[in-house]
């Protein structure tokens, strides 16, 4: 944080908290008390009305606001919830910036709007991080490294743990890729990248990446690539039809499985059609419904489910 940013932060903190001691400002802004004294003096010399009282702290003269921005309570809640979201889902640098943004927004809100926004936010809670803490920390660290690589236009070297094993049982692969973008989907962060090995654009779940390192090899984003317009090719060519117990139809709908194509509720049950790349992608999900689901077709997948159930029975 440079001198100008730090002095602006002092004003915003005094607007937000009203009275602060130099020691408290120094801790919050990660600087020395002596530096805070110098910044306070400099601000006073250019006309910022800061007053200080020994043993009490510094404050701004009532009525001084910077900048003159007005928000409705709904606008303030939207911005503050957005900051909460970024703080939870992004890497540490963006998380810190989200915290800083929230403090700045809170500092310029008139008290009635602040109170109304606080009331609204107290009734809203984001529960987004469902992964284990270890995965979450690793994923956020990777996000920071990937962002750095994209800014520098350099490729990254990764070890990737695939969800489904190859024919030999191996699930790990080593890749060098050109990172084109990051996308947050329901299951977590996805890296969109040009893969040197496959010579095409591929997707990598960030939580499954390890041994991530930025290389010295430069790359350029293709002129015809736009992350916001990008749509991955749909390689789900295998169709699976299942019949669920009608009593759990609402639960199956709420599960919102990615591979679900369409469904119909009849007197004899809830018929659901899936489209997958590989039947194994759906196996564990189908098994989780126990006796409330039957695979109708294809016969090969029906037999695969039966085979897995027989393996399970050997443990009981």
Image: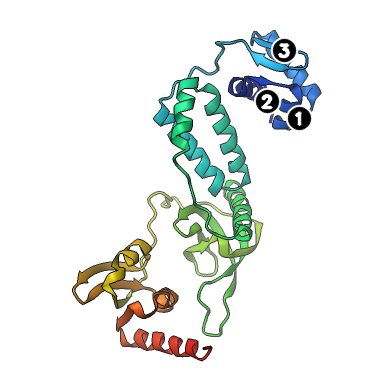
Q: Is residue 14 left or right of 131 when viewed as pictured? A: right
Marks 1 and 3, how far apart at CA: 19 Å
Q: Is residue 247 left or right of 89 when viewed as pictured? A: left
Residue at the limit of the structure toward the right, as seen here? 34
Do callouts 2 and 1 mark residues in contact (Cβ within 8 Å)?
A: yes
**Residue under pointer 2:** 6
Q: Is residue 278 visible?
A: no
Quarter of the image that includes the N terminus:
top right
In primary-sequence order, the first of circles 1 and 3 is: 1
Q: Residue at x 60, y 60 (%)?
A: 135
In primary-sequence order, the first of circles 2 and 1 is: 2
Q: Is residue 219 visible?
A: yes
Residue 222, image x, y percentages: 46, 53
Residue 102, image x, y percentages: 55, 33
Marks 2 and 1, how far apart at CA: 9 Å
Residue 155, image x, y percentages: 60, 57
**Residue under pointer 1:** 31
> Toward the viewer: 8 or 56?
56
**Residue under pointer 3:** 52
Numbered disc 3: secondary structure = strand
> Toward the viewer: 245 or 304?
245
Front position among marks 3 and 2: 3
Q: Is residue 71 left or right of 66 when viewed as pictured? A: left
Residue at the limit of the structure toward the left, as seen here? 267
Q: Compared to 309, does 76 lie above or below?
A: above
> Toward the viewer: 16 or 189?
16
Q: Residue at x 47, y 44 (%)?
A: 125
Q: Residue at x 62, y 23 (%)?
A: 17
Residue 39, image x, y percentages: 73, 18
């Amino acid at each position: 944080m440079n001198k100008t940013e730090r002095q602006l932060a002092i004003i915003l903190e005094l607007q937000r908290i009203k009275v602060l001691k130099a020691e408290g400002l120094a801790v919050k802004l990660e600087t020395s008390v002596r530096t805070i004294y110098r910044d306070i003096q400099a601000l006073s010399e250019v006309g910022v009305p800061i007053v200080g009282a020994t043993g009490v702290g510094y404050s701004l003269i009532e009525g001084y606001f910077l900048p003159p921005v007005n928000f409705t309570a709904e606008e303030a809640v939207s911005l503050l919830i957005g900051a909460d979201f970024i703080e939870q889902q992004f890497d540490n640098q963006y998380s810190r910036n989200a915290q800083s943004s929230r403090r700045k927004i809170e500092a310029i809100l008139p008290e009635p709007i602040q109170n109304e926004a606080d009331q609204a936010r107290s009734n809203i809670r984001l529960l987004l991080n469902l992964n284990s803490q270890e995965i979450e920390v690793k994923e956020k660290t990777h996000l920071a490294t990937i962002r750095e690589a994209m800014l520098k236009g350099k490729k990254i070297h990764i070890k990737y743990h695939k969800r489904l094993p190859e024919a030999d049982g191996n699930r790990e692969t080593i890749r060098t890729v050109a990172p084109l973008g990051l996308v947050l989907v329901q299951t977590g962060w996805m890296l969109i990248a040009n893969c040197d090995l496959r010579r095409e654009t591929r997707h990598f779940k960030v939580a499954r990446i390890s041994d991530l390192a930025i290389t010295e090899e430069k790359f350029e984003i293709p002129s015809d690539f736009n992350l916001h317009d990008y749509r991955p090719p749909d390689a789900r060519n295998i169709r699976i039809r299942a019949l669920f117990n009608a009593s759990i139809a609402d639960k199956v709908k709420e599960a919102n499985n990615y591979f679900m194509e369409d469904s119909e509720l009849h007197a004899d049950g809830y018929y659901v059609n899936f489209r997958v790349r590989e039947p194994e992608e759906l196996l564990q999900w189908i098994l989780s419904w126990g006796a409330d689901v039957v695979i109708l077709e294809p016969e090969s997948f029906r037999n695969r489910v039966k085979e897995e159930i027989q393996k399970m029975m050997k443990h009981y």
